[in-house]
């Protein structure tokens, strides 16, 4: 795992997976994980993508091995700036960008605020903002504080993962991976993202976009996801029927293959 120091002094970690041919210059694909996640949540995506693209997976601030931000260091604009500063750190002009859930919302903000830095955007289980969601995020944090993150996730796992489609042992791994994150960081991250609504700015996204929405999401209505299709000029809209929120974890191979198809379609 590698690291860089953001402009506000916080150390952020990232991983590079690159199995592209060394004699050609491959495009870079940057993956941004969900809240309560880490870069490791994209583990199953790497074999599908890293042969054709240099895959970079960031631990967002307050997650995984990245530094824990102070309250002053946790703003939504800062999350997008972290992505751009990682692109700068890698010495790149632009990247393909893909994000899951809250990571998708952060990725949307990068495409809005820094359009020249994003070649394409893939948004999984990410409406234009968490503000329109049907969940009580403050209630989430209260339960996490009283019961612990692991107990909270075990109680709500069916909202996130289709248990009929994951292998034995996955849920325990998923929860253990989430518990690597500090509750104090989540208590700053979740409220920061929960107030965001990009709807009025979606028209600013100029790059090709693929939106993949879970058809049985208890957190967001399909109409919320459809706003992306309505407002973004170049938008491919896909629905995974009968799946709950965390499609990137429930069907990672399907998601990664979808992304590879989309990227190759861009030529």
Image: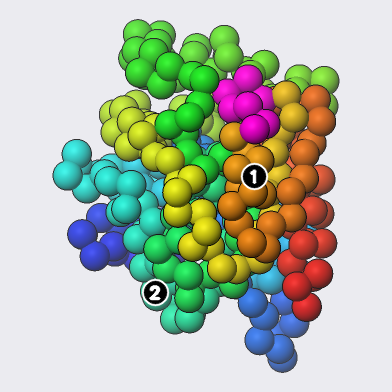
Question: Which residue is under mark 1?
Answer: 124
Left or right, residue 160 beside residue 166: left
| Closer to us: 84 or 208 | 208
- At 36% from the left edge and 34% from the top edge, which residue is drawn? 195
| Element marked by disc 1 | strand
Up the image or down, 189 lies above or below 165; here it is: below
Q: Main secondary structure of the magenta part?
A: loop
Look at 52% across and 58% down and name the residue there.
Answer: 203
Q: Which residue is mark 2?
A: 89
Q: Quadrant of residue 260?
A: bottom right
Disc assigned to residue 90:
none
**Residue range (magenta):** 217-223
Left or right, 155 with reference to 194: right
Please tell me whether residue 222 belongs to the stretch shown in magenta: yes
Q: Residue placed at 64% from the left, 32% from the top?
A: 223
Identify whether 30 is placed above or below 169: below
Viewer-nearest of discs 2 and 1: 1
The earlier-in-sequence mark between 2 and 1 is: 2
Q: Please, is residue 73 above or below residue 174 in the view?
A: below
Residue at x 36%, y 68% (from the top left corner): 85
Q: Nearer the viewer, residue 138 or 48?
A: 138
Q: Is residue 72 magenta?
A: no
Q: How is the image coloured?
A: rainbow
Visible residue check, residue 214: yes
Picture quadrant of residue 69:
top left
Residues 114 and 87: in front is 114
Distance in Å between CA atoms under marks 2 and 1:
25 Å
Q: Residue furthest bottom?
A: 23
Quarter of the image for residue 189 reads: top left
């Amino acid at each position: 795992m590698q690291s860089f120091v953001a402009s506000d002094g916080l150390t952020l970690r990232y991983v590079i997976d690159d199995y592209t041919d060394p004699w050609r210059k491959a495009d870079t694909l940057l993956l941004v994980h969900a809240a309560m996640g880490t870069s490791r949540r994209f583990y199953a995506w790497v074999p599908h993508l890293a042969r054709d693209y240099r895959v970079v997976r960031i631990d967002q601030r307050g997650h995984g091995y990245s530094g824990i931000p102070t309250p002053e260091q946790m703003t939504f604009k800062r999350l997008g700036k972290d992505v751009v500063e990682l692109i700068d750190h890698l010495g790149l002009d632009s990247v393909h960008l893909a994000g899951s859930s809250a990571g998708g919302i952060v990725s949307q903000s990068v495409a809005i605020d820094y359009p020249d830095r994003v070649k394409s955007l893939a948004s999984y289980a990410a409406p234009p903002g968490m503000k329109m969601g049907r969940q009580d995020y403050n209630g989430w944090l209260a339960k996490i504080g009283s019961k612990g993150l692991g107990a909270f996730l075990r109680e709500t796992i069916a909202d996130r993962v289709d248990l009929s489609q994951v292998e034995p042992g996955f849920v325990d791994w998923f929860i253990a991976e989430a518990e690597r994150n500090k509750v104090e960081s989540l208590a700053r991250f979740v409220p920061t993202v929960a107030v965001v609504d990009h709807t009025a700015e979606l028209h600013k996204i100029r790059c090709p976009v693929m939106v993949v929405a879970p058809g049985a999401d208890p957190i967001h209505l399909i109409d919320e996801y459809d706003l992306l299709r309505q407002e973004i000029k170049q938008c491919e809209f896909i629905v995974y029927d009968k799946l709950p929120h965390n499609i990137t974890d429930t069907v990672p191979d399907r998601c990664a293959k979808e992304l590879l198809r989309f990227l190759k379609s861009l030529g």
